[in-house]
Image (spheres, rainbow, N blue to C red):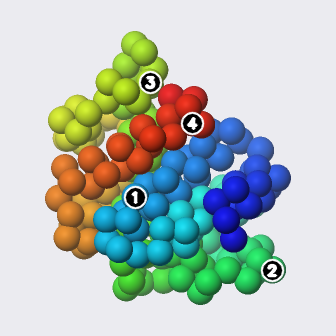
Amino acid sequence: MTRDEAIEIVKEHVSSRNLVNHMIATGAVMKALAKKFGEDEAIWEVAGILHDYDYPETKEHPEKHGLISVELLKKYNLPQEVYDAILAHCDKKPREKLIEKAIYAADPTTGFIVAGALIRPEKKLEPVDVKFLIKRFKEKSFAKGASREQMASCSEMGLSLEEFYDIALTAMKNIHEELGL
C-alpha cells in the first residue's frame, strides 16, 4: 500500500480532520525514523498512517483499540509488521521489533509537537524547536494527554529525547502545509 492509498482509506473511514492529521503526522515521523535506521520507509510510514484506523469504533472501548484496526485492515493484505506495529502502539503486543518501539514513541509525540505549535502566536510549526519541546516535556501540565513515558521510550531505539524530537519535528515541518501548521 502506498502513502496516498493509506491516506485515502483513512479519510474515508475517519471523519475527524484532527485525527487524520495526527495519523499523517505519525506516518511522517515513522518514515523519518525508518530512514534513520535504514528500514523500509514505505512500510513504516503506512504503519504510522494507519495506527489509529479504528479510533471511531474504539474511542469508547480502548480495550479493543488496535485489535479492530487489524481486523478491518486484513482485507488489504498488508505486511505483518504493519499489523504488529498497530498492536504494539497500544500495548496489545510486546514491543519487540524496532518498528514497534518507534510507533509507540511516535504516537504521543505528534500531538505534543502540535500542542507546541498551537500555543505559539503564529500557530505554526516553524518557530518550534527542540529546546522548546524539551522545556515543555518537563511541564507536566502541558499537553497532559501526551505520555511522557511513551515519548521517553525513544531510548529503547538508542535515541536521546533531543535526537528523537529533532527527527520528529523535522519530519512534521516537512509536511507542515499538509497539516495546516
Give the mark nearest the N terminus, 4 or 1: 1
Label 2–label 3 contact, CB within 8 A = no
Please say if 52 is above or below 157.
Answer: above
65 to 109, vertically: above or below: below
Mark linked to residue 124:
3
**What's the distance in space between the residues labelled 2 and 1, CA to CA?**
27 Å
Res 159 → quadrant: bottom left
Badge 3: how crowded within 10 Å, few (<14), some, or many (20+)?
Answer: some
**Type of amino acid at the residue the image marks with label 4:** Leu
Task: Calculate the distance from the C-alpha at mark 3 to the C-alpha at mark 4.
Answer: 10 Å
Q: Left or right: where does residue 54 sit relative to residue 121?
A: right
Instruction: State whether residue 12 is above or below residue 40.
Output: above
Distance from disc 3 to disc 1, alpha carbons, whole Å, reads 20 Å
Residue 49, horizontal then vertical, whole percent = 60, 59
Q: CA distance from mark 4 to mark 2?
A: 28 Å
User: Which residue is identified by label 1?
Assistant: 32
* Disc on the earlier residue, 4 or 2: 2
Q: Quadrant of residue 100?
A: bottom left
* Pair 2/1: label in front: 1
Q: CA distance from mark 2 to mark 3?
A: 37 Å
Q: Disc 2 or 1, which lies upstream in sequence?
A: 1
The label shown at residue 179 is: 4
At x 69% / y 61%, what residue is drawn?
6
Left or right: 136 in relation to 57: left
